[in-house]
Every structure is written in structure tokens, then in C-alpha cells.
Amino acid sequence: MHTFRHALRTQDFTLTAELALDAHSDRESIVAQAKALVADVDAVQVTDSPGERVHLSSLAAAAILLDAGIDPVLHLHCRDRNRISLRSELLGAAALGVSSLLLMRGRELPEDFRPRIKQVYDWGGRRLIASASALEEADFMIGSIATAFKPDREWKPGKLASKLDAGARFIQTQLCFDIDLLRHYMSRLVAEKITRRANVLIGLAPLPSAGSAHWLGKHLRGAVVPAKVVKRLRQATDPEQEGIDICAELLQQVADIPGVSGANLHCLVEPERIVEAVKLSGVRG
């Protein structure tokens, strides 16, 4: 099986893409999505009920992918589980043969979310990373998340460094469509030698419309969608194709930023649109 770990070690630019999961996802739909992607990406990422959405267990989806011969990057966050449950998930992932994890604290639910749900946070992201790293039953490629921004001269990546100390070996940013911001952020990670210790993947996506771009920039925590991107989509005669073109252009530019190891493509549209953006970008040679 071609794995994410191998791609990070051997390729100049690694690509992954996320599955679109929901409460109705089944084996057939998961395999169909993944097979539409795997010729053009190195691994398929399996999200863990992001935001307020409940969907099929990420561990179950990872098992389905492994059975189909596709390498998953399994997401796992702390919000909905205590430490016993988190350790059980890690043991389950190891037993299934999952080799790569993206571990995080998880986003808090909004105050007005109904029905009110108890948020656990028995552990934080760093503790979960350390537990996965210490697990004798597995040798995971462990990753965590970071928010790209324009740091000032005094900024030090203390939180990132602590995650690497705990065992993280790759870092993945939020959705960011601001290339100048990314260049600035990555220059600081290079200067602080973070990129010597971890691979960095940038979050991108083909945007389907100006409305979706505006909503992401306003409501998805951390997402950076410049006004010029929204304007470009609004003025396009074919917004969906324009979103693919924008994604392809950003992939080209991101691939040239020193310190960047690859990109993760969020699934806001059909998998075929992600494939089209990758092919159009030329980053796969």
C-alpha cells in the first residue's frame, strides 16, 4: 500500500484529501469517494465529526479504507471522549493497521448550540499526542494542527514545539487562501527550525461559490478567505470552475514556499473537482 508516511519521506510535495462524511455514509459511498481521489493524492484523511456535525465513526471509515487498500489519515479529537475512550480508539487504530493520525483538542461547540451537549476535554491535544507516541503496539506517523497567521517579530512557536516534543511529526494548517500570509508564516517556522522537525501541510479546497467562500471566512474558526477571492468567485461566469482554478493556482504557489511539504484538500465539492484542481495545478508532475 502506498502510504502517507512514505510520501512524506520521499516526495517534495505530498497531497492528501478529506472524505466528505455524514450520518448516512456507508461502505459503498466511502470507497467510491476514496477511489475517485487516490490516483492523485497520497492518502485520504478521515475527519472526526468536525464542528457540530455527527457522522460515521472515523475509525470505522478508516477500517473501510484499509480494507479497500487505501491509506487513511485518521483524525481524533478530545472533545467527545475521556482518556479511557481515547486510549481505546488508539488501540483500535493500531489493531486495524492505521499508520497515520491527526490528533487535536477539538473545537468547542458554540454557546447557542442545541441541544446542549457535555464537552469532555479530559485530555488536551498534547497529552493525546504523547499517549499515541508512547503506545508500544504501534508506530504511528502523528500529526497535529496549527493556525497560520502573520506573527510579529517576538513570536515564538512554543505550542507547536511542545506538540513536536510530545511526538508530532507533521503539522497541518487550517484552510488558508492568503498566499502572502502563508509565506510570512512559513518563513517564521523555517527561521525557528520547526520545519526541520516536522512536515507542514497547508489546508486548501476548491471553493464552489462566493457564498460558501464568504461563509467559511466568517464562520469556520481560523479559516482565511481574502475578500479578493470572494470577489473573484462572485464575478465569475462559472463560479465552480473558478473555485477549481483558484485552488490550482494556490497549489502551485504553495508548492514553491520554502518549508512547505504538501497540502491537504478539504472536500467542499465532489471528489472529482479536487482531482481536477490537482491535475490543473501540475504539482503532481
Image: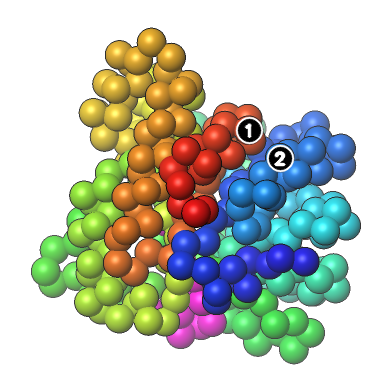
Residue 230, above or below 101: above
Q: Give residue 97's position: percent from left, percent from top.
A: 81, 71
- Secondary structure beneath label 2: helix
Which residue is found at the position 21% from the left and 49% from the top?
Answer: 180
Which residue is found at the position 24% from the left and 57% from the top?
Answer: 183
Which residue is found at the position 46% from the left and 47% from the top?
Answer: 282
Find residue 150 and report its image quarter.
bottom left
Q: Give residue 190's position: percent from left, percent from top.
A: 27, 74
Whether the magenta-drawn stretch holds residue 170 is answered as yes
- The residue singled out by tag 2 in the image is 36
Judging depth in this view, the residue of 8 and 115 nearest the camera is: 8
Q: How is the image coloured?
A: rainbow
Q: Are marks 2 and 1 in contact (CB under 8 Å)?
A: yes
Q: Amino acid at mark 2?
A: Ala
Judging depth in this view, the residue of 80 and 143 nearest the camera is: 143
Q: Which residues are magenta?
A: 161-173
Q: Give residue 266's position: percent from left, percent from top.
A: 54, 42
For label 1, the crowd category at 10 Å Cα-Cα, with few meaning under 14, some 14 to 19 and many 20 or more, is few
* Residue 87 seen in the figure: yes
Whether the magenta-drawn stretch holds residue 132 is answered as no
Q: CA distance from mark 2 to mark 1?
A: 6 Å
- The residue singled out by tag 1 in the image is 272
Q: Amino acid at mark 1?
A: Glu
